[in-house]
Amino acid sequence: MDATTIPGRIGLIAVLLFSGAVAHCPPARAVALSMAPIRTIEFGDPDAKPSNPQRRTAVVTAVALSPDGQRLAAGGDDHVVRLFEVANGRMEHRLVGHRDWIRGLSLAADGDTLASVAGDHTYRLWQLSSGTSVEAPHDCKNPLRAVAFHPNGLQLATAGFCCPARIYNLSGGELTLEADSPCRDSHAITFSPDGTKLAVVGAAGTLRVWNAASGVVLYDIPADVRRLRAVAFSTDSRQIATGGDGGEVRLWNAETGQQERALPVRPAKVFCLKFMNDEDLAIGGSDNCVAIWKTSGPSLLHKLCGHTGSVTSLAINADGTILASGSFDTTIRIWRFPLQPTEKTAAGTTLPAR
C-alpha cells in the first residue's frame, strides 16, 4: 500500500481504525505531550504461565494506595490480595483467605488497615505492614461489590448484590447502621471526606445519599437511565461525581443534590472515578484509558493511555501526586503528578524526560 497517494492514505487509515490502533488515542487538543507511567506492575503469579500454559494472570478489579503513596494493594479474580512496594514494584505479601472474586478494597486513615470485599459474602481486614489478617472474616450474607472506610478510620461501609448498605464499627465488627439501597444491585459506595455523608449507586441509575450518622436519606437522584458503576466525592466534599454505562459523568452539588455540569465520555463505559483534588477528576473505563478532567471548566487535561484492557479501578495518595490504575489487562500502572513528558530510547522504550 502506497501511503503517499490519496487512496493509499485512505486505505492506511481504514486499516488502523479496524485494527483498533488509533481507536483510543486522545485528541491532540487534550494532550500536548506523550505521557507514560513511572511503573507498570504485573499482577498475579509471575510463574503462572510458565508452569501451566493454560493459566492466565489474574485481572485487576480493585486497587488502594497508602496515604504516603509507598504501598499498593490490589485484588482481582484469583481471590488473592497482593501488596506491592510502589518504588520498585516488588510484591511484599499475598493475602489469602477470600473464596471468590475480590471486588473492592479500601485503606483506613492509618495507612495500615486494609478492608477487602468479595463475592464470597465477606469483608476481611488486613494489616499491611505485616501482611496478616487482623480478625476473622465477617459474613454479610450476600455477594459484596464495594467497601469504604469512614475518614475517622473507625468505621467501614459495604454494599453489594441484594443487600442493604451497612456501616460497621471496626472494634468487634458491630453493625451500627443498615440502610436500604435504591436497587438490588449496588456497585459503589463512598463516604464524603468530611465524614457527614454516605453515597451509593447501582444498576437502577439512582444516586442515594444518606446522613452518615443517622442513616436518614438526604436525597435520591435519578442520575442516569442506565447502570451506574462509580461514585466519588470531591476532596472538599462539595461535589459528587457519578458515572456508568451512560454517555456522561455527571457532577452534583453535594448539599442540594442539583446537577452542576456533565462531562462527555461516550462511547466508553465508566468503571471508576477518583477526585485528585477539589477540581481534578480521574475517570477510568472501557476505552482502556484514564481521563483527567478539570471539573470547573470543564476541560479535558490529560488522557493517560497504555492499558490494553478496561480500566477497572483507581487509587490516589493523600497529596494527589501518585495515581494507580488497575485493569483487565492484568497490570497496574503508576502515574506521578505533575505528569512528565516522555522521550524514546534507542531500544524503543519510553522513559520520563529529564
Image (spheres, rainbow, N blue to C red):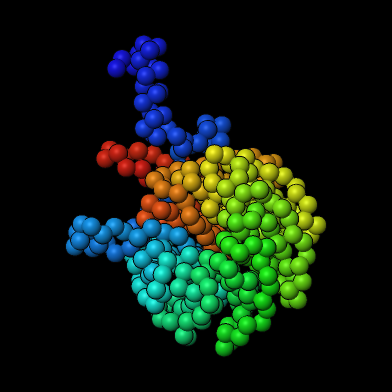
The residue nearer to you, when weighing 213 against 205, is 205
Q: Say left or right for 235 vs 30.
A: right
Could you tell me which residue is drawn at 52 percent across and 31 percent down?
A: 28
Q: Residue furthest bottom?
A: 172
The residue nearer to you, when weighing 351 against 128, is 128
Q: Residue furthest left?
A: 51
The C terminus lies in which quarter of the figure?
top left
The residue nearer to you, when weighing 326 against 90, is 326
The N terminus lies in which quarter of the figure?
top left
Q: Is residue 47 visible?
A: yes
Q: Is residue 111 visible?
A: no
Q: Say left or right for 350 vs 272.
A: left
- Numbered circles on residues, count: 0
The residue nearer to you, when weighing 268 against 253, is 268
Could you tell me which residue is drawn at 48 percent across and 46 percent down?
A: 286
| Above or below, comparing residue 22 to residue 282 in the picture | above
Residue 196, position as x, y percentages in the image = 73, 70
| Above or below, comparing residue 52 to residue 134 in the picture | above
Residue 225, position as x, y percentages in the image = 66, 48
Residue 345, position as x, y percentages in the image = 31, 40
Could you tell me which residue is drawn at 38 percent across and 70 percent down?
A: 80
Hey, which quadrant is residue 316 in on the image? bottom right
Could you tell me which residue is drawn at 35 percent across and 73 percent down?
A: 94
Hey, which quadrant is residue 10 in on the image? top left
